[in-house]
Image (cartoon, grey):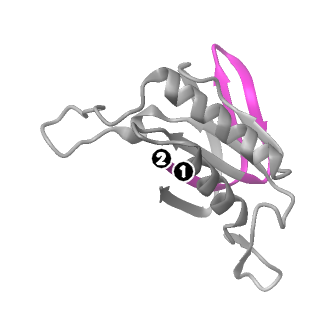
Amino acid sequence: MKAVIQRVTSASVTVEGRVVGRIGLGLLVLLGVEKGDAEAQADWLVEKIAGLRIFSDDGGKMNLSVRDIGGALLVVSQFTLAGNCAKGRRPSFDTAAAPADGQRLYEYFLEAARLLGLPVESGIFQADMQVALVNDGPVTFILER
């Protein structure tokens, strides 16, 4: 399972011209599910993301988590994170989870984040989405488990 995490002052996801998820201060999480991933990977990622100290404290140091600042998550399924560009010019998606497994683990991730008390917004699994964000910093991290 892979996640690209971006610290944002705002972010939204639109499907067919309609905003389906929107947050203010918090984290945009692009989530990719691969073959062999299970709930254990999702649990680890959710805990890691919730506790990651990447927001500035009063001294300007990255010392606060999304929980500490009362921020939210916008979680968007990102199938292309499983893409392998090592050979040729067309990405291979051989390692991507089957759609049913991907959706199940994506929804599990959303619920696990909510159970931690985080406000969570989301995109729509397998939809053609447009994601808008204001990356704060910019601050971006890649997590894999």
In the picture, residue 120 is in which quadrant? top right
Residue for badge 1: 41
Badge 2: few (under 14), some or many (20 or more) residues near its Cα, within 10 Å?
many
In the picture, residue 70 is in which quadrant? bottom right
Span of residues in magenta: 1-26
Say if 40 sits above or below 143 in the image. Answer: above
Q: Amino acid at mark 2?
A: Met
Counting from the top left corner in percent of width and height, residue 75 is at 65, 40
Counting from the top left corner in percent of width and height, residue 123 is at 65, 29
Toward the viewer: 48 or 69?
Answer: 48
Residue at the extreme left: 88
- Residue under the point 56% across and 19% down: 127
Residue at the extreme top: 16
Residue 92 visible, this orientation: yes
- Residue under the point 73% across and 24% down: 19
Residue 7 on the magenta segment: yes
Provide the major secondary structure of the magenta segment.
strand
Q: Is residue 12 left or right of residue 67?
A: left
Toward the viewer: 24 or 144?
Answer: 144
Q: Are marks 1 and 2 in contact (CB under 8 Å)?
A: yes
* The disc label shown at residue 1, or none: 2
Q: Amino acid at mark 1?
A: Gln
State the separation of the CA atoms marked 1 and 2: 6 Å
Q: Secondary structure at mark 2?
A: loop
Residue 24 on the magenta segment: yes
Toward the viewer: 108 or 29?
Answer: 108
Say if 94 sits above or below 9 in the image. Answer: above
- Residue under the point 23% across and 42% down: 85
Q: Is residue 63 left or right of residue 133?
A: right
In the picture, residue 50 is in which quadrant? bottom right
Q: Which tag is nearer the camera, tag 1 or tag 2?
A: 1
- Residue under the point 83% across and 45% down: 119
